Image (cartoon, rainbow, N blue to C red):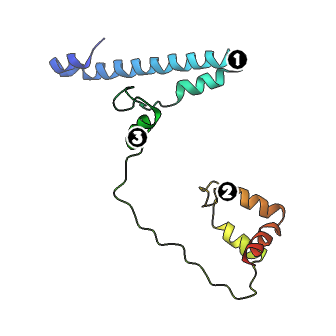
């Protein structure tokens, strides 16, 4: 087997080194695939959770200063700035522009449908923390519910 180190001494061996590297990487892939296939064939009820634990990326969770904290409050004071550092580059956001409604103005189903159409089902939820897919589902099942809620709040 030719290594990359030997190719520095003899550059003519570069192709052999590349082939050996490719062969090694392919053998590793085959071994991983075989192991995974065997794991899945013999999997029991809780093995899906085990597989998830093996495949998820692990983040460092060490707290500065180790475990030398006399109480939970001092530990909290160390953890918060460590894991959630203060962002000094805050971006100013203008508050949303509100439209002044006429005295007896109501919202109808077409306006709700038009507003919901702008958002994907998988978009992050708004300030109410309700996903847009849920609002769309409610509106598609009964298009009178959301306008009734909005109009009640407007009154």
Could you give the CA–CA distance between mark 1 and mark 2, rounded to whole angstroms? 36 Å
Could you give the CA–CA distance between mark 2 and mark 3, rounded to whole angstroms? 32 Å
For this view, does 127 lie left or right of residue 66? right
Question: Label 3 belongs to which residue?
Answer: 77
**SS for dot 1:** loop
Mark number for residue 130? 2
Question: Label 1 belongs to which residue?
Answer: 44
* Dot 3 crowding, Cα within 10 Å, few <14, some 14–19, many 20+: few
Please provide percent x and percent y for residue 56: 52, 30
Tally the numbered discs: 3
The one nearer the camera, 137 or 2, is 137
- Write the residue at 68% across / 67% down: 116
Res 100 → quadrant: bottom right
For this view, does 115 lie left or right of residue 146? left
Vertical comparison of 50 with 85: above or below? above
**SS for dot 3:** helix
For this view, does 70 lie left or right of residue 154? left
Circle nearer the N terminus (3, 1): 1
Q: Quadrant of the N terminus?
A: top left
Please provide percent x and percent y for residue 57: 48, 31
């Amino acid at each position: 087997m030719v290594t990359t180190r030997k190719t520095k001494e003899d550059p003519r061996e570069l192709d052999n080194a590349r082939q050996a590297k490719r062969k090694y990487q392919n053998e590793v892939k085959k071994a991983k695939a075989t192991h995974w296939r065997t794991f899945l064939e013999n999997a029991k009820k809780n093995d899906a959770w085990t597989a998830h634990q093996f495949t998820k990326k692990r983040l460092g969770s060490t707290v500065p200063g180790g475990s030398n904290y006399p109480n939970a409050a001092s530990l909290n004071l160390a953890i918060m700035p460590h894991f959630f550092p203060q962002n000094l580059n805050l971006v100013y956001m203008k508050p949303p522009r509100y439209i002044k409604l006429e005295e007896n103005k109501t919202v109808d189903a077409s306006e709700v449908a038009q507003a919901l159409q702008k958002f994907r089902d998988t978009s992050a939820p708004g300030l109410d923390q309700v996903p847009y897919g849920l609002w769309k589902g409610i509106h598609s099942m009964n298009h009178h519910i959301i306008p009734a809620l909005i109009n009640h709040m407007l009154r």
